[in-house]
Structure formats: structure tokens, C-alpha cells
Image (cartoon, rainbow, N blue to C red):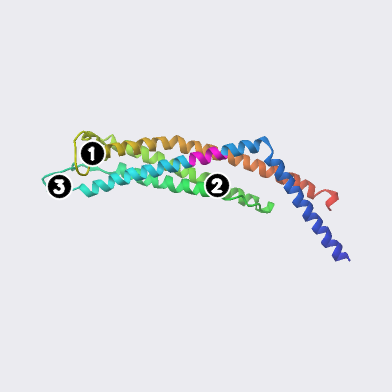
Amino acid sequence: MESFGRNMSIGTKTEISASNFEADAESVRTSPSFRIYRLIDSARLGLTVLGLAAGLTILGVSADSLAVFHATYVPEDWLLQLWPANFDVRPTVALVVGSALVIVANLVSLIAGKIPTVRRPPSLFLLNATVRAAITFVPPAIALIAAIIAMSFFYGVNASTTNDSLQSWTCRWKDVTMNVQPHFGTLCKQSRAGVALSVMLVPVEATILGLAAYQFTLEKRFDLGARGPSRRKAGSPALS
């Protein structure tokens, strides 16, 4: 009988604890802060999709420009040279690498945003917070750093007065009519589009990082608010 009574007491505590948790979760969902959280989450996801689309476009136009260059480049001993001897493709390579990192980072952010938060015991709350912080901050931070480095490197090398880059050379000869590759006019437009999108990515990724920080702050507030009342109820004389 004593064992039966102890089991019933444990079962009652579990049911009450679950009921308290559901009530706390429902109060969080109906709070004004949670509505703000949902708006911020939607804005962050929308900007992440925008960053992903921009990264894909940059990768597409930059990789295509590099492919055309390698397909039409001839050694220096050839009579008809389409490209100068002092030619630097590093700015375009930087756009390819930077956009690839942006794509991966934004994909990770989108996938992580679809994973529901798993509740764990309070003893593991610190670990959960660390994992959530890494998932929240690392991808947009990597995307922001990659966009800044790619843009800065492009403008730094493109400003050279001795070596031509893909953009400087193709835009210089963009008015030349060509029936076959490399089509300098098309490559010039592609290069300018890639650079413009890389510039746009910097404020976009910075905004995503800021929204992620505010969203993480709200999540911690919701966690503490949901766990605090349950602890007090679990420690009350009525449940002991």
C-alpha cells in the first residue's frame, strides 16, 4: 500500500507538472512579446531567403564569368590575345568563394529555423542555450564576414592601376560587338551585378544577425518565464 501510494503521488506530481508547463507555454504564446517574436522570426527568415537568393545569383554570374575566361584564354605566344598578360582573376574568385559561404550559411539558418525547440531538464538548460546560441549566431556571422571580405577584396584588387581584373577589362571593351565568346558586354554586366549584390549582402546579413540576437534574447526570456512558475509550483507544500 505504501508503494502504491508513493507511485500515485509521483504520478500526480507528474500530471500537475505537465499541466503547469502547458499553462505556462500557453501564456507565453498569447503574450505581446511572443507576437513580436513571431514578426521578428518572419522578418529574419525572409531576409535569409533574400540573402540565399543573392548568394546563388552571385555564384552563378561569377562562376560563369570564370568559366568563359578559362575557355577563351590562350597562351601569350598566340597572335590574337583576348585577355591581357597582367590579368587578375582573384576578385572574381573571391566573389565565388564568398557567395558559396553565404549560400551554405543561409541554408543552415533556414534548416535550423525549421527545427522545433526541444525542451530539456533544467540541468541541461545551459547546454541548450549554448547550442541555440551557436545555431542562431554562427551562420549569419559567417555570411556577414564572407560578404565583407569578398566585397573588400574585390574593390581592393580592382582598384589596381597595373593589373586588369575581369570587370575592368570586360567593361573597357563592352561596346565591341562579338558574335562568339567571350562577349565582353555580357561579362561586364554579370560582373557588375555580382558586385552590386555582394554590396547589398552586407547590410542584409548584418540585419539578419541583429534580428537573430534580439530573437535569442526573447527566447531566453520565454524559457525563464516558463520554467520559473513551474519551479515554484513544484516546490509548494501542496505537491510535497
Q: Which residue is mark 1?
A: 184
Q: Residue at x 61, y 52 (%)?
A: 127
Q: Which residues are magenta?
A: 41-48
Label 2 crowd (10 A; few <14 / some 14-19 / many >=20): some
> Please, what secondary structure does the residue beneath circle 3 have?
loop
- Residue 181 on image: x %, y %: 21, 44
Give the numbered dot on residue 76: 3
Picture quadrant where residue 143 is located? top left
Nearest to the observer: residue 222 or residue 123:
222
Q: Residue at x 39, y 35 (%)?
A: 199
- Front disc: 3 or 1: 1
Nearest to the observer: residue 83 or residue 125:
83
Q: Quadrant of the N terminus?
A: bottom right
**Residue at the extreme left:** 79
Q: CA distance from mark 2 to mark 3?
A: 52 Å
Q: Of the residues shown, which amino acid type is indicated by label 3?
A: Glu
Give the numbered dot on residue 123: none
Give above or below for 159 relative to 132. Answer: above
In the image, is 52 to the left or to the right of 81?
right
Q: Residue at x 72, y 41 (%)?
A: 27
Q: Which residue is mark 2?
A: 113
Picture quadrant where residue 28 is located? top right
In the image, is 94 to the left or to the right of 131?
left
Q: Are marks 2 and 1 in contact (CB under 8 Å)?
A: no
Q: CA distance from mark 2 to mark 1?
A: 42 Å
Res 134 seen here: no
